[in-house]
């Protein structure tokens, strides 16, 4: 018997053949199908990628002529600026900017400086620096930011050229890289660098290296700036480093307006030049000791404009948004918000009061409806003093900060009828209360007791110090938050003296006007998509069209509204502030408009004087003082001191009266047109009227013998004023000064 479990053998011991094979695995067919689909998709992807690359390369080939001709792009039409009513204001540049140099006319120092800070591997890569991109990517990952850039000089040149031609696409980064690679096959490194320097923006309206060299260092090299002796040819290493440092941010590194930033950046460039072997150690050490060009030695290309301060400020916004080449030479037509008739009237009003005196003035008028800037007086003479006092002049606001304190208090539920002691106040602060802040009214003149509303009318410092430092939850920090919500961009210090306007860094007339306009709009902060900071700054232009009058991309403004203060709070604050004009410290600003309100402000020793206020239609702030100093203005107003209730209030009244006259005249013009009156073709509007300088002695702004209620017919008291410095320590205090 065969053993159990063994297979029987055939005769002869042969092993029987194996049985039939098992059926095939049915799961293999779907797997094969998936592989086939995968291969098909892969093939299609490769084909799509090849097609895309081919299409992009074809586009690159089509773009090359535009890149080649970019250096000559400046020969096209200058861009023009118009006011809100279509009246021409001027151009954004001049023929002084149309300067092309060849390589031999440009100092090696500026070439080396630009390469060292912008593209250290410029002479090694082929248009695209993959090593630099990788290094930048690693640094971005390590710092969890996108601060590092990987663009080469060639890519920057291409980017500027494409932006100027308005031909950048969705694949712009790839396209720029491809163009940069192709360009380096056609041009030498030196030609690329030369054309880059000829077409880069250096700030101050200086487009191209020769315009920049003349602007910043023409004074240091007498005789340069001719076709045979260009200023760019004689730049010293430290001068070249200054200009090269500006390229990354022409506004932030401007040596005139931001010398500390510019100096640090210049020294960084010198360090890079030394590390890369472009200068010796001696040149590096000597270069870092050189002073930057003095503001008076910086001479920008002449700006052809009826409103040069405004146009200069507008120009930088356009450069930031559209690029320098398109802004200057793209034949753009920019519709600004400025009203040339109001601008002329404002300048005339200021000149009528201050033309023969030492102080100067800055003012801004904003349309409440759309945050449009209608007028900007920013200095006495742009050619002599191009510094824009309206946008860059940080001055102590004095008691003009009190509407912000009042708004904060009302928003926190503090009643305007809350009564405070009006008398000398002492506040302790700092470590263990060892520092003292003393507050006194001018000439130790007090109300005895006063409500918050009454203290606003007569600008009582002692009451407002108690409100700001004791009643308001969060104190000065809460006040600063309110200011920023209203639209103030400057960081406000939170020292005790800030409740009297004694800030460590002052505010500009532009941002102060904008903050007051938010209050005028019942807490609605109005801005626009074309504002410098969309949603949080006023608007300077509303439309940009090309040379064919077609709207360009991102060339149309849309209003932005943000409710930052409850409407009821703002309305109550304005109601209280109206008493300042009718019976308080700002009566000289009264033009008889029932909707108007405002606040005076004067700093210690009468170094700064303000009036800020609004009507239903517009908001304006006026500052008066000495531009470069805080010189006390003790005799300039008819032999007496200048305070917020004198020149600033009078100028405000004159400008706002002119605005209302202009609006009335335009309404008549429109009515005549609608009626088809044939006389409208010869209609000549009268010159806007304004208040003449007062011949009466000024009503003082702080209380000397003040009534207890704002309704009183007694003379308005003189305003208590803020310490000139924001810092307070030891026995220094907040004693008030005139104005």
Image (cartoon, helix red, strand yellow):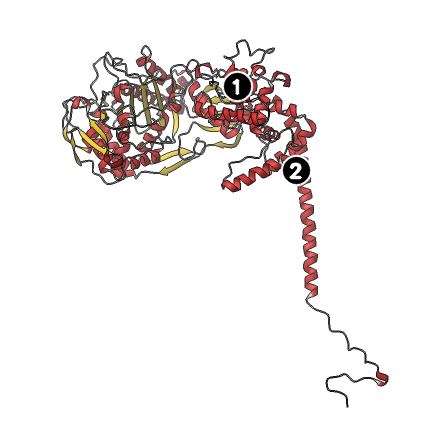
Location of the C terminus (image quadrant)? top left
Circle 2: is it few (<14), some (14-19), or many (20+) Cα within 10 Å? some
Residue 366 relative to residue 125: left or right: left
Element type where label 1 sits in the image = helix
For residue 93, say whether it is visible. yes
Going from N to C along the chain, the mark reached first, 2 or 1, is 2
Find residue 352 and report its image quarter.
top left
Query: What mark, if any, has residue 544 been given in the picture?
Result: none
Tell me the distance, in whole angstroms, between the alpha carbons under discs 2 and 1: 41 Å
Element type where label 2 sits in the image = helix
Query: What mark, if any, has residue 239 been given in the picture?
Result: 1
Query: What mark, if any, has residue 56 been given in the picture?
Result: 2
Circle 1: is it few (<14), some (14-19), or many (20+) Cα within 10 Å? many
Single out the residue that lies furthest toward the right.
12
Q: Nearer the viewer, residue 67 or 107?
A: 107
Q: Nearer the viewer, residue 665 or 356?
A: 356
Residue 209 at x, y percent in the picture: 56, 20
Q: Nearer the viewer, mark 2 or mark 1?
A: 1
Find residue 647 and report its image quarter.
top left
């Amino acid at each position: 018997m065969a053993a159990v479990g063994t297979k029987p053998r055939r005769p002869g011991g042969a092993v029987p053949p194996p049985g039939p094979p098992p059926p095939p695995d049915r799961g293999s067919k779907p797997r094969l199908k998936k592989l086939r689909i995968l291969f098909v998709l892969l093939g299609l992807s490769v084909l799509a990628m090849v097609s895309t690359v081919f299409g992009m390369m074809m586009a690159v080939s089509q773009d090359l002529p535009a890149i080649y001709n970019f250096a000559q792009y400046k020969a096209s039409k200058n861009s023009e600026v118009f006011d809100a009513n279509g009246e021409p204001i001027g151009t954004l540049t001049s023929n002084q900017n149309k300067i092309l140099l060849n390589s031999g006319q440009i100092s090696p120092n500026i070439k080396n400086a630009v390469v060292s800070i912008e593209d250290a591997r410029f002479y090694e890569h082929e248009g695209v620096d993959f090593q630099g991109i990788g290094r930048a990517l690693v640094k971005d990952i390590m710092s969890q930011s996108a601060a590092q850039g990987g663009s080469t000089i060639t890519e920057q040149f291409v980017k500027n050229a494409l932006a100027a031609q308005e031909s950048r696409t969705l694949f712009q980064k790839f396209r720029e890289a491809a163009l940069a690679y192709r360009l380096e096959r056609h041009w030498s490194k030196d030609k690329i660098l030369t054309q880059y320097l000829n077409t880069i923006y250096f700030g101050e309206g200086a487009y191209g290296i020769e315009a920049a060299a003349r602007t910043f260092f023409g004074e240091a090299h007498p005789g340069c700036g001719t076709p045979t002796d260009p200023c760019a040819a004689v730049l010293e290493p430290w001068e070249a480093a200054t200009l090269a440092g500006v390229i990354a941010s022409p506004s932030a590194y401007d040596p005139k307006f931001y010398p500390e930033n510019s100096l640090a950046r210049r020294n960084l460039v010198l360090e890079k030049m030394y590390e890369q072997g472009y200068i010796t150690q001696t040149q590096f050490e000597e270069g870092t000791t050189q002073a930057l060009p003095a503001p008076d030695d910086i001479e920008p290309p002449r700006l052809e404009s009826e409103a040069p301060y405004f146009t200069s400020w507008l120009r930088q916004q356009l450069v930031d948004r559209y690029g320098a080449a398109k802004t200057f030479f793209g034949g753009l037509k920019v519709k600004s918000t400025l009203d040339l008739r109001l601008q002329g009237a404002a300048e005339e009003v200021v000149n009528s009061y201050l033309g023969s005196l030492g102080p100067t003035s800055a003012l801004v008028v904003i349309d409440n409806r759309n945050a449009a800037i209608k007028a900007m007086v920013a200095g006495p003479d742009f050619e002599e003093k191009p510094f824009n006092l309206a946008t860059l002049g940080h001055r102590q606001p004095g008691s003009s900060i009190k509407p912000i304190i009042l708004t904060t208090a009302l928003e926190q539920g503090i009643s305007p009828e809350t009564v405070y002691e009006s008398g000398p106040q002492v506040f302790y602060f700092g470590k263990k209360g060892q520092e003292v802040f003393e507050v006194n009214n001018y000439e130790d003149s007090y109300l005895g007791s006063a409500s918050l509303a009454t203290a606003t009318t007569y600008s009582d410092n002692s009451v407002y110090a108690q409100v700001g430092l004791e009643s308001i939850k969060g104190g000065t920090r809460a006040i600063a938050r309110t200011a920023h919500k209203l639209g103030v961009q400057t960081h406000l210090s939170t020292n005790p003296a800030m409740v009297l306007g004694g800030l460590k860094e002052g505010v500009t007339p532009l941002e102060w006007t904008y903050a007051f306009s938010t209050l005028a709009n019942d807490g609605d902060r109005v801005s626009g998509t074309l504002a410098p900071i969309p949603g949080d700054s006023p608007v300077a232009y509303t439309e940009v069209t090309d040379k064919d009058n077609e709207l360009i991309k991102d060339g149309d403004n849309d209003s932005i509204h943000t409710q930052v203060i409850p409407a009821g709070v703002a309305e109550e604050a304005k109601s209280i502030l109206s008493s300042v004009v009718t019976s308080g410290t700002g009566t000289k600003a009264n033009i008889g408009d029932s909707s108007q309100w405002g606040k005076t402000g004067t700093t210690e020793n009468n170094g700064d004087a303000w009036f800020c206020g609004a009507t239903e239609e517009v908001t304006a702030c006026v500052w008066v003082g000495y531009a470069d100093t805080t010189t006390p203005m003790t005799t300039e107003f008819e032999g007496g001191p200048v305070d917020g209730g004198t020149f600033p209030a009078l100028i405000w009244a004159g400008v706002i009266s002119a605005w209302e006259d202009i609006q009335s005249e335009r309404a008549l013009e429109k009515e005549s047109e609608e009626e088809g009156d044939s006389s409208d073709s010869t209609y000549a509007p009268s010159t806007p009227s304004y208040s003449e300088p007062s011949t009466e002695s000024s009503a003082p702004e702080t209380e000397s013998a003040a009534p207890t209620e704002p309704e009183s017919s007694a003379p308005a008291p003189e305003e208590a004023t803020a310490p000139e410095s924001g810092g307070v320590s030891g026995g220094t205090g907040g004693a008030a000064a005139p104005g």
